[in-house]
Image (cartoon, rainbow, N blue to C red):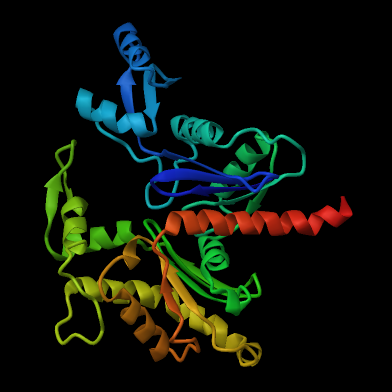
Amino acid sequence: MSTSLHIGSNSLRTLQNDSNQKLTSRSIDTAYTIMEDTKENRFFLRKLTTPFLCCEDSLIIPGERACQIARFSNLPLYPLFSKGELVLNDPVHRQLLSTLIQSILPKSKKTGEYCSFMTPGTDATSSLNKLVSQLITLQGYTPLATSISLAAGLSAFPAISRLSGYAVYLGHSHSEIGLIHQSRMVIQHSAPYGSEWMDEQLANSLKLFTTNSEGQQVPDTEKAKLKRRNPGINISPFLTNHSVIASWYESLLDSLLDHFVLQMEAMQHYLTTLEKLPIVYLGELSHIEGFGEFLVHNLSNRQVRFDSQQVTHVQDEQLSIARGALVVSAMEQDLVRPAA
């Protein structure tokens, strides 16, 4: 069996492929809400068959039910991750992450099974990755950290490319780009900027503010998100008028591509032996009119060689990421099998 676990900023997803090639997918939201630990609240949650955790005189309701309970009881809804990070010294967050992983990652049925995983951050050696590795091990798997760009590439590259090309991901809490050759990552770069960062920048630049529960004035990121998602917005570089949103996209790509291109220059001799490669792109920020042209324009300006006839937007990104991570897990399984 091969298994993948994608820990995103808003949800956790697993995909498993058993010996009969049957795929099983599971997912759960990462948001949660908190209720006071009283007999009445316990009775209320049990009557609704809503699972909860007990922690420091509080009842923690995670996952999909949290949104319903928060709306019904007029309670705030909290994100488990903020800017791609988990508050690791918070016992509630650690317990929540452990519970969520256990709920969608069943115990391994035999030893030696690999589980490839991805987290929202940009550092493969982060404390969050170490914690996730430990939690996966407790479920009986051998953890294998991978990246969204590698997983997306392995899933979405055209067959003729022989699992080679560029994968660009612009997500919620971070963005990344990778050059993959025959299923192996050659060059990769990540930046801690995604839609979360962009909506905050937009709110500040457009002077969109709101008052939080503590009476402080903060950027109204929800209004900014609505502005960014306006169907009339187009960031194509060939338009005469450029929006403020296009300028923030430019800043994000600068932070992502500049360092990536420097790495490419250091490997120029090797790269000249490669054919022009395809590009796949995905992520929350890629769903805007004109982004494909915008990306191609920025890569071309940096003299990146690629096949302009094979630039693909990955629409079903969650499934593609999960499938690609499953490939990573299966390949690692195949490498160790002869030695077993």
Instruction: Say left or right for 11 vs 215.
Output: right
Identified at 55% across, 61% down, the residue is: 151
Q: Quadrant of residue 288?
A: bottom left
Residue 96 vertical position relative to residue 41 in the rendered view, above or below: below
Identified at 38% across, 46% down, the residue is: 10
- Badge count: 0
Instruction: Say left or right for 237 vs 100.
Output: left
Q: Quadrant of residue 233?
A: bottom left
Can you name the residue that lies furthest to the right here?
339
Identified at 64% across, 58% down, the residue is: 328
For the residue pair 230 and 2, the one nearer the viewer reads as 2
Q: Which x, y percent locates residue 182?
A: 66, 74
Q: Can I make out residue 106 in this image?
A: yes
Instruction: Work out which quarter of the rendered image holds the N terminus and state it.
Output: top right
Q: Can I make out residue 121 in this image?
A: no
Instruction: Say left or right for 315 vs 334.
Output: left
Q: Quadrant of residue 158?
A: bottom right
For the residue pair 306 and 130, the one nearer the viewer reads as 306
Q: Which x, y percent locates residue 4?
A: 59, 49
Residue 31 vertical position relative to residue 305 in the rendered view, above or below: above
Q: Which x, y percent locates residue 75?
A: 23, 28
Identified at 17% across, 63% down, the residue is: 230
